[in-house]
Amino acid sequence: MVFPKYVKVRQERFGAVVFDTLKEKVFVSNPTGADILRLLGEEKSIGDICDELSRSYDGNPAQLKVEVNNFVDELRKRELFII
Amino acid sequence: MNKAQGIIDELEDISITGSNVEDFESPLFIAWQLNSACNLDCLHCCEEAGHKMPDELSREEAIDFCRQIIDLKIPYAAISGGEPMLCPHFFELAEVFTSNGISLKVETNGMFIGDKEAKRFAKLGMRSIQISVDGATAETHEVMRKRGDFRKSLDACKLLIENGVNTEIVFVPTKFNIHEIGKAIDMAYTLGVYGFYTGKIMRIGRAAQNWDLLCPTDEQYAEAFEVLKAKQVQYDGKMKVYYYPYDVVDELKYRLHHPAASLLVIPNGKVKLIGPLPFLCGDLRRQTLKDIWQRYKKAWKEKAVIDFTNRVINDPQLLCESNRWVDLYPE
């Protein structure tokens, strides 16, 4: 699981920016998305990401897992992440 | 509350870099006009390029600028000119970018790309090289690109593609070539380029001086955009056919309220707000890139900028002043 070569992720105060420099399209995420993006960049598995986030965020772990999977799926559909 | 909820909603496509420029800690994109020297004398050159500026950044200053781009984690840079391959340290700078993970696009006329250069580009692993090809025939290309060589530009594309370099063609429509736009797209596809980019000619620099000679009529544009739409469908999934439908005035109307998260650096290290306006907001010899970014954000709110931009919107002839620089913050 990797970011394509020309997809660049940068952490920002508001969260993160994902820049597909090949398509010249910019996306932004909130701080939770930024955490997921950071952990994806560290090549963590979805399971590890959920474990790590569940220690930082309140809420139902099962729901968190759904949200993380949806987020990663959204990245994949936009060709911002390769699984 | 589970903060993870809603993250997808906030992953939004803002399409054009920096619709919320205030939020970004540094630019997302640097457009760098590396030098002013050019071997051609194009009728439509935005930069009025030709001769070297006397005060262009030195090699050391240019490398320092690259380092600042890397330190600020700016993801994407484009090097243009003049003709950037005439700059003796061009490849060295390109290497600094790509070896530090920055996506790099180079905009060139392709006249200095032989097999050796194509192989060198291939090793760099750049995002792309954009070659200017302004016609489907030598006659049209060379009437606009004085001293240009259509065959050499196409050969450059072929060599780059053979060596696995992501190659794009840029086509500026004018009265001379707009009728060939469909054929030019077909030719680009035959060459195997990644993308074909076009849009309305920008009324700045030498293009502004030659405006009546160059600018297509509304009818010609309408016909060309119909061709482009059809070609987009024809090459969907095979080659990117991209056209920007707005002109400089439309762009300025938008940018006045939504500045791009990008900086335009000219060969002497001064930083422009945007190509069509004359305003400078910084100087790499006097400020750090980080400081210039803050100046840039402030500059778009300056009365002088807002007033002049509105005047340009009402009187596009003022675009002729785009290269007569006005320093917003003289020291």
Image: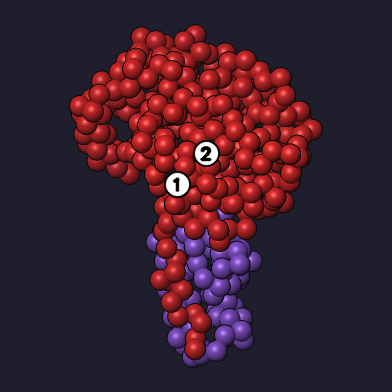
Q: Residue at x 36, y 40 (%)?
A: B250
Q: Are marks 2 and 1 in contact (CB under 8 Å)?
A: yes
Q: Is residue B151 visible?
A: no
Residue in view at x 45 percent, y 52 percent: B258
What chain is tagged by disc 2?
B
The quarter holding residue B194 reads top left
Name the colour assigned to chain A in the rendering.
purple
To which quarter of the image does residue B324 belong?
top right
* Chain seen in red: B
In the picture, measured across the screen, residue B127 lies left or right of residue B295, that is left
Upstream in sequence: badge 2 or badge 1:
1
Q: Residue at x 41, y 41 (%)?
A: B310
Q: Residue B177 appears at what percent x and percent y?
A: 32, 18
What color scheme is it? by chain
Tag 2 residue: B274
The residue that label 1 is drawn on is B255
Question: For residue B233, which quarter of the picture?
Answer: top left
For the residue marked with disc 2, what is the amino acid? Ile
Residue B171 place in picture, x, y as percent: 39, 26
Whole-Å distance between the Cαs marked 2 and 1? Answer: 9 Å
